[in-house]
Image: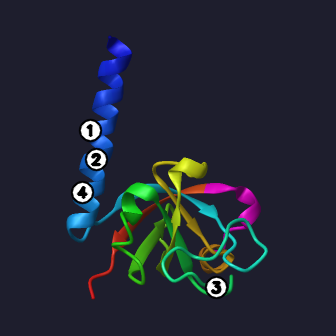
């Protein structure tokens, strides 16, 4: 019974976050940033937003399913802030699908984002916060 209650609570929180993040601009959301390849022949297929491959030299991000929604943030720019206070803006072009191993608080960014932060991609994951950029 306790595990069922925990599952319902976790599910409720995830639904709330998805609706909240899709409903309007959000700010300073904690996340884990990982590196992703957006070019043909790397990790996944083409970007979910436009069905295209993109250069890893561009500032790009794939967002976890709950934040991606059904494409609400496609083509939008988010601001990503490192623990050291450096901020980089990147465009959402893909979903980091939780059904395929992406964490529920993960954003997966191009190598260019890591370079902009001055972080070696071999680190794997780093804590960041992200915010919507108002257009």
Sooner in the amino-acid sequence: mark 2 or mark 3? 2
Residue 105: x, y in percent? 46, 51
Q: Is residue 71 above or below residue 34?
A: below
Q: Nearer the viewer, residue 25 or 114?
A: 25
Q: Which element carries disc 3, helix, strand or loop?
A: loop
Q: Residue at x 35, y 70 (%)?
A: 131
Residues drawn in magenta: 118-125
Q: Which element carries disc 2, helix, strand or loop?
A: helix
Residues marked 3 and 1 touching at CB (< 8 Å): no
Distance between mark 2 and mark 4 Cα atoms? 6 Å
Q: Which residue is mark 2?
A: 15
Q: Which residue is mark 4?
A: 19
Distance between mark 1 and mark 2 Cα atoms? 5 Å
Q: Is residue 118 above or below residue 101?
A: below
Sooner in the amino-acid sequence: mark 4 or mark 3? 4
Q: What count of labels does the image hold?
A: 4
Q: Residue at x 24, y 57 (%)?
A: 19
């Amino acid at each position: 019974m306790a595990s069922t209650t925990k599952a319902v609570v976790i599910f409720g929180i995830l639904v709330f976050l998805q609706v909240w993040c899709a409903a309007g601009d959000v700010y300073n959301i904690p996340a884990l940033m990982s590196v992703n390849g957006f070019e043909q022949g790397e990790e996944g297929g083409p970007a979910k937003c436009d069905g295209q491959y993109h250069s890893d030299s561009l500032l790009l991000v794939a967002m976890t399913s709950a934040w991606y929604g059904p494409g609400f943030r496609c083509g939008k720019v988010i601001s990503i802030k490192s623990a050291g206070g450096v901020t980089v803006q990147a465009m959402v072009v893909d979903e980091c699908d939780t059904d395929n191993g992406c964490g529920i608080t993960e954003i997966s960014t191009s190598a260019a984002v890591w370079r902009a932060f001055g972080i070696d991609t071999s680190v794997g994951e780093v804590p960041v916060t992200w915010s919507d950029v108002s257009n």
